[in-house]
Amino acid sequence: MPTRPSQNDPERVAAWERRRKSVGKRIRELRVERGLTQEQLAHDSGVDRSVLSGVESGLRGLLYERLFDIADALGVPAGELMVDPT
């Protein structure tokens, strides 16, 4: 994604926002299904709890590596976290 605000296509920005929210929602769903708190998942994945909170709320994105760390801690393939936002 371009770094200058003038280069950001509003449709692209909106698409990334939908994707962030979708991934965060899926992480939260799986975490709750497994009876984990954010603190427990953060510890198990090595991701800071405040980062995890931001991801689950759709306000933050993740580094590729952290996505895999969270997926491993949840016991799912990373692709399971990246559902198509509709």
Image: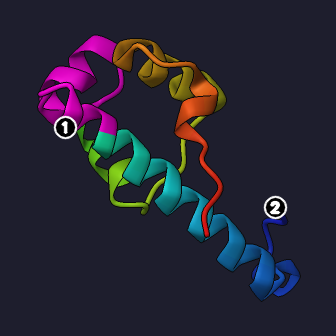
Tell me the element at label 1: helix
Dot 1 and dot 2 residues touching (CB under 8 Å) = no
Crowding at mark 1 (Cα within 10 Å: few <14, some 14-19, many 20+):
few
Q: Residue at x 40, y 13 (%)?
A: 75
Height in image: 9 above or below 69?
below
Residue type, mark 1 in image: Val
In the shown orientation, is residue 3 left or right of residue 28? right
Height in image: 36 above or below 1?
above
Q: Residue at x 34, y 51 (%)?
A: 56
- Name the front one of labels 1 and 2: 1
Q: Position of residue 22 (x, y in %)?
A: 51, 57
Q: Residue at x 64, y 30 (%)?
A: 79
Q: Which mark is residue 54?
A: none
- The magenta stretch is 30-48
Q: Place residue 13 in its image quadrant.
A: bottom right
First along the sequence among labels 1 and 2? 2
Q: Residue at x 61, y 59 (%)?
A: 19
Q: Is 40 included in the stretch rendered in magenta?
A: yes
In the shown orientation, is residue 86 left or right of residue 49? right
Height in image: 83 above or below 17?
above
Q: Quickly name the residue at label 2.
A: 1
Q: Which mark is residue 32?
A: 1
Q: Position of residue 38 (x, y in %)?
A: 18, 35
The C terminus lies in which quarter of the figure? bottom right
Main secondary structure found in the magenta portion: helix
In the shown orientation, is residue 27 left or right of residue 9? left
Tell me the element at label 2: loop
In the shown orientation, is residue 83 left or right of residue 6? left
Q: Is 23 included in the stretch rendered in magenta?
A: no
Considering depth in this image, is 69 or 85 the residue closer to the camera? 85
